[in-house]
Image (cartoon, rainbow, N blue to C red):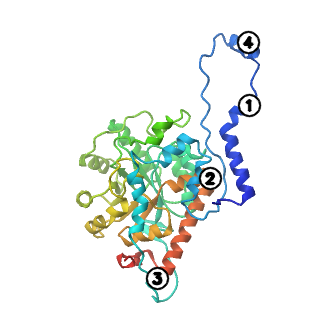
Amino acid sequence: MTTDPPSRRGLFLAAGAAGAAGAALAPARPAAAQQQQEGERGALQLRPTPRPYPAPTAEQSLRMANLLEIEEAASRIIPEGAFAYIASGADNEWTLHENRRAFDRYPIRPHYLSGPAGLDLRTTLLGQELSMPILTAPMGAHGLAHASAEVGTARGTGEAGTLMTIGTAANRTIEDIAKATPGPKWFQIYLMDDAGRSRELLQRAKAAGCSAIVFTIDAFAPGASDRVARLGFSFPPNLPLVNSGTAVFKRSLTWDDVAFIQRTVDLPLVLKGVLTADVARAAIERGVAAIQVSNHGGRQLDGVPAALDALPPIAEAVAGRVPVIMDSGIRRGTDVFKALALGADAVALGRPVLYGLALGGWMGVKSVYDHIRQELTRTMTIAGARTVKDVQRNFLF
């Protein structure tokens, strides 16, 4: 796999390793000098100061064969525990792997001899024009992937001409993330036990320019990863979740919480984590503006179906009344094409964005979007679809 020309790649990986080991390479002070310094402070330092988390720092465009391969490259520069937290799924990871296997169950039915050439990937989502039907999914703690954290993700997403979803569990403030992108942005919220804190976040998001609120309904209890538990990973103290702070997230959600968000802020509400047609119908009846079909990338409840398999009955129930977004498992342009054909208006990209961020900062994020745009363009061209709206169920066998 190649993400950069060999010479640059060697330098890049060496730089990442140096960042991770910088403190270990610092010369040790003689014991006597250290004791003298401690004596001058008047107290013995009983525990060492924790070393800052060594996030990657490279800023560069990436060359790649596909988005599947950059995961392995990112695993070599993100510290092991943090990479496990990003990449792993819950329990046996059945749902995590089903998210990928599902795409093999829907072969493309090309429309050859279909007429004039010309392609337009642009789409509009809740009033926001996007350069492609692909946006950045909400994810927490981007500082685990890169020193620029969500600011880098937002800039790369905006430079690609698409939409950034700012997460509650971010390492940078809503305001700083919003300023970093020239494109549209939404805010994803985890509701807190303290309604006042939730209200404050929603109002800050609107003031920062977010044009919609994404309410995640499937993550009110923490997921459990065997890989993370085995490594004993915990969040580094120098990467605080600055928006939520130490607030406790709600562990029980109802439709009253949907109404609370709608009363608090006058913005379209996207319900994320929908896996059944019943919930989608009930959401529309309650004024929800868009449905996001998602199983949280297989991170929450293992054993639920692949998001792609859940998509067709939900799209049928929605019947075009509101936009449908799908995430979980998107890695290729053909994946995007199949999701559109099964009823999605757009898809959200998750882990590959973080891998691109780790490997190249904001430029790496833009490289990820440039690559998947190229793949989707090629797929639509050969299959015979000229616009995003052209991609319907008749493009699949």
Q: Can residue 207 be seen in the rendering of this structure?
A: yes
Q: Which sits earlier in the primary sequence, circle 3 or circle 1?
A: 1
Amino acid type, residue under disc 1 in the picture: Ala
Q: Quadrant of the N terminus?
A: bottom right
Mark pair 1, 4: CA separation: 20 Å
Q: Which sits earlier in the primary sequence, circle 1 or circle 4?
A: 1
Mark pair 2, 4: CA separation: 43 Å
Q: Quadrant of the C terminus?
A: bottom left
Amino acid type, residue under disc 4 in the picture: Gln
CB under 8 Å between callouts 1 and 4? no
Amino acid type, residue under disc 2 in the picture: Leu
Q: Give the mark count.
A: 4
- Residue bearing mark 3: 384
SS class, disc 4: helix
Amino acid type, residue under disc 3 in the picture: Gly
- Residue bearing mark 2: 359
